[in-house]
Amino acid sequence: MTRDSLIALALGLVAAVAFVSATAGPLPMRLILFLVTPLPLLMAGLGWGVRACLIAGLAGAVVLAAFGPMVAAVFAVSQAVPAAVLSHLAMLSRPAASGPTSDSAQALNREPTSAPAADPVAREWYPPGRLVIWAAILAAIPALIWTIVADANSEDIKTALTAALEAAFKAGSIEAPGGGPWTPEGIARISSIVYAALPGGSAIAWMSSLLLTLWMAGRIMRSAGLLTRPWPDLASLEFPKSVALVFAAVSLAAILDGPAGIAGRAFFGAFLLAYLLLGLAIIHFITRGANWRPFALWALYTGLLFISGLVAVPVALIGLTDSLLQLRRRYGQPPGTT
């Protein structure tokens, strides 16, 4: 067995341990372990190639099969497959065309290759904007599967949500609109709204995990000298124009009932996060070189942390209108400007 295969096996074992550990213990620690579970798999893919990522994913699934075939299947679908796809796409490249190319122009009229390049700067690499879209798709699919499976026990889940909300309202002394205690009917309505939002919330959590660990794996492999592609200018992130039409379609589907509505809400959550990230990239780009930039970014991320709903929607709208308004071309500074 080669050294690379042994490294992949070890990373797969680490991912399996993190995956199992995320099902027990204090909630904050479980959340952290869930978010970092794909990290070892993506490190294998970015550092030693997609084959190493597949070996790591298979090793993790085999270990988790001891806890039951369903556990291994969930790990494969939600962690191993997305990590293999993203690491494969991240390392795709082709010889650079003459002249400058934008992120969307790189999106390839011909198929790129995954062959390593002696000079990574002289190659066009798979656009990071498309990696974000793939992460949205890969996160929405397991979220959709999980929600459909959970829908068979929807009444039990709604009952548990109602009890949790009632306890939270009492513990926080949160009054109902208009003052006074919450009625059982009011709590049940809030519980139904939360239940309807579960597909989108699950997709957002999965996508956040994938993108965060992809970024972390890239940084780690870059520091170790094992990342062959150059680090992208993330503030220049772009999406294909057709993605806006897809987002409009899933937004309409999200208001439907039944399986179509569940699917629509799962993909709506994932694409909403994608456009939020695009909006943040645009803000980072157009504030380059401005003296007030640190204060603006500090206020933006503080708002996202504490009043996310009020801040995230306008930022996502900035991303959604990017193809029409061309904000970076009108107001932005060139890459490399601080």
Image: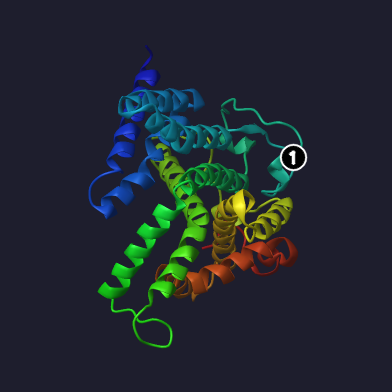
Q: Relative to residue 31, is residue 106 drawn left or right?
A: right
Q: Nearer the viewer, residue 1 or 83?
A: 83
- Residue at 45% from the left image edge and 41% from the top image edge: 218
- Residue under label 1: 98
Q: Nearer the viewer, residue 102 or 313?
A: 313
Q: Secondary structure at mark 1?
A: loop
Q: Nearer the viewer, residue 116 or 324?
A: 324
Q: In the image, is residue 86 above or below residue 9?
A: below
- Residue at 64% from the left image edge and 28% from the top image edge: 113
Res. 305 image quadrant? bottom left
Residue 168: x and y in percent read 30, 69
Which residue in the rendered view is the most extreme toward the right?
109
Q: In the image, is residue 241 above or below residue 295?
A: above
Q: Relative to residue 75, is residue 275 drawn left or right?
A: right
| Residue 133 seen anywhere in this rendered image of the structure | yes
Res. 276 image quadrant? bottom right
The N terminus is located in which quarter? Answer: top left
- Residue at 31% from the left image edge and 43% from the top image edge: 22
Residue 90: x and y in percent read 55, 37
Residue 82: x and y in percent read 51, 37
Q: Nearer the viewer, residue 81 or 47?
A: 81
